[in-house]
Amino acid sequence: MDILPTSNSANFSTVSTLGDQSNTTNKCPPAEFKDWHSSVVPACMLLTSVLGIVMNLFVLMVFCFHKKACTVAEIYLSNLAAADLFLMVCLPLWAANAINRYDWPFAHHLCSLFPLPINMNAYCSIYFLVLISIDRYIALVHPLSHKGISRPKFAKLGCLLVWGFGLLLSIPTLVYRKVAYFSRYNKSLCFLNYSVKEQLLFDGIQNTFGFIIPICMISYCTLIIIHSLNNRLIERSKSQKMEQKATTLVLVVLLVFVICWVPHHVVLILTTLIKAGVLRECSIIANVQICSTVFMNLAFFNSVLNPILYVVVGKNFRKKVRGLFKQWSIDRTMTIRNTSTVLSRFRSVKPTFTTEENTI
């Protein structure tokens, strides 16, 4: 249950248990290592990591330090930014592995630890979007019910459950990832040490709970939301207009997420079919290997696009940014004034001397 490929330079058979490799992929020649795997791929990862860290820190700073409390939708978006930041911080390790031509350069325990935030990001991100979709669905379709359940405490509880569920789905990464030397590739690979049955079981769980179920829920809510927006009258109340602004941002975030993550999940499903022996053509296997690298990096780049969307599309977010900078400007001005006042008072105090001192 791991969104990372075992190795971009290795054949899919390496993900099987040592000595128990799949007969399906053994008929195909091993994938050749391409130079761009150790140059272009890590460069893209490092650039994505730097931009993602800066931008998601900025988003969290705006949500956390603004004087007004976050709305339910903003609580979900801030947790989404935290998940993205979690991923971006750990991404340079995978870039270093790619630079080393996927010959694992770190301690063995890091092999199981560092993919954990990457997998948690994949699971948590999509379920945060599920929560956001449900919130927007209820707000637009059942507004009376929304007032009763759209409380920050419920949103925080939902986020806590999502983090726990993401960790639960990522446990196989901690248990089964290991480092072993493969003479076939003359490398020590960080791979998932599954048996064939365990592999198919965990892949099925990943594809079902990590993609199929949540994407169906998001699609259903999104279609109802769009239908509801189209049926609205031109004249809307102020509260309805605010709901529409929030919904517009959510829809754009959902669309970009689908564009970035769906190709990667489709490749994961195809990979599962290859492992199960359903797909046997060597050309298909080779193309899936190439696509896994490209689409994985596209999925990572989604963590950079989300903060940009908040600024470009989110009018309420821009108001929060302006309000935060205004608040900081006022605080800075007050600090400077207080400092100058203290200094002026200090300078205005004249020293007093006793008679003895004057005589001397």
Image (spheres, rainbow, N blue to C red):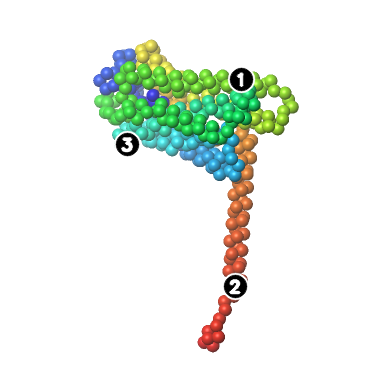
Exactly how many numbered labels are in the figure?
3
* Residue 106 badge: 3
Q: Dot 2: what SS?
A: loop
The x, y position of residue 310, in whole percent, is 58, 34
Q: CA distance from mark 1 to mark 3?
A: 48 Å
Q: Is residue 311 visible?
A: no
The quarter of the image holding the N terminus is top left
Q: Quadrant location of residue 138? A: top right
Q: Residue at x 64, y 19 (%)?
A: 227
Q: Rate crowding at label 3 as few (under 14), some (14 to 19) or many (20 or more) other CA atoms within 10 Å.
A: few
Q: Earlier in the sequence, mark 3 or mark 2?
A: 3
Instruction: Tell me the kind of residue under disc 1.
Output: Ile
What is the x, y in percent for residue 213?
Answer: 48, 20
Residue 24's x, y, as percent? 33, 14
Q: Can the viewer see residue 276?
A: yes
According to the image, label 2 marks what residue? 349
Would you say 196 lies left or right of 142 here? left
Tag 3 secondary structure: loop
Which one is nearer the viewer's eye here, 216 or 92?
A: 216
Q: Secondary structure at mark 1?
A: helix
Q: Check disc 2: other Cα within 10 Å, few if <14, some if 14-19, many if 20+.
A: few
Mark 1 or mark 3: whose residue is earlier in sequence: 3
Residue at the disc numbered 1? 224
The x, y position of residue 80, in whole percent, is: 51, 33
Q: Residue at x 63, y 43 (%)?
A: 322
Q: Please identify the residue farthest to the bottom as the structure is shown.
A: 359
Q: Is residue 346 above or below residue 317?
A: below
Closer to the camera: disc 3 or disc 2? Answer: 2
Q: Nearer the viewer, residue 56 or 237?
A: 237
